Amino acid sequence: MSPRSVLEGLNVLREEFDRSFAMPARQHDAEQSELLAVRAGGRAYALRLAQTSGLWPDRPVTPLPGPVAALLGVAGFGGTIVPVYDLAALLGHPAPERPRWLVLATGTPALALAFHELDGHVRVPTDAIVTEASEHPHGCLRGMVALAGGIRPIIDLEAARTAVHTMAGHQRSGKEHDR
């Protein structure tokens, strides 16, 4: 391939990229939901990607004692110390080994949840998600979705944050933590 054809190809790509900003938002984005397929305590779940702000494998967690057994400790994210909770323990499942993955939830106060396995990122039609109120004791489950390998409950990360603070005996008002 000649240098001239490479430059022409780059110019075409640049023009397409610039033109993409002038186009209206794609309709399929509103009709699709992006999920992370995860496993916690040997059970399959899904997380809404829109409720996450990052995903990390093997991130160091400094252990801390605390009133909640699910509290693994704290981890640093962009200069901020964030509490890390074991998702399996939060959902009431035994967790024989330490979770490998951390997901940072959007919103405040900061919260990271640890889980054992990441099965992947999937995009599904929004109408494939069955939404329902949770009957789970901690109220973190909000709906179900059929993915390869079976039906997965969807964990609502904002509801998980509320459950963590309720378990720790803290009260919240609005979006901010009172203490």
Image (cartoon, helix red, strand yellow):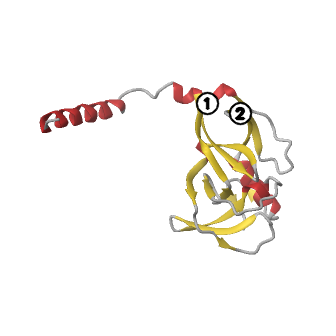
> Which is nearer the eye, 4 or 168?
4
Q: Find residue 97 and report its horizontal and vertical position in percent.
A: 73, 62
Q: Which amino acid does label 1 sit on?
A: Val
**Which is more toward the observer, 7 or 76?**
7
Q: Which quadrant would the N terminus be assigned to in this image?
A: top left
Q: Using the image as rendered, state which of residue 74 and residue 165 is in the foreground.
A: 74
Position above or below: 108 against 10? below
Label 2: which residue?
A: 145
Which of the 4 image quarters holds residue 11?
top left
Above/below status of 17 relative to 106: above
* Pointer 1 or 2: first along the chain: 1
Is 149 on the left or on the right of 8, as rendered? right
The quarter holding residue 18 reads: top left
Q: Please provide percent x and percent y for residue 63.
A: 68, 73
Mark 2 lies on a secondary structure that is strand
Residue 137, given in percent of the width and then of the height, sits at 87, 49
Query: Quick check: marks 1 and 2 in contact, CB under 8 Å?
Result: yes
Residue shown at the point (72%, 64%) measured from the top left: 178
Circle 1 SS class: strand
Within 10 Å of disc 1 (Cα), the crowding (few <14, some 14-19, many 20+) is: some
Amino acid type, residue under disc 2 in the picture: Val
Q: Name the residue under label 1.
A: 124
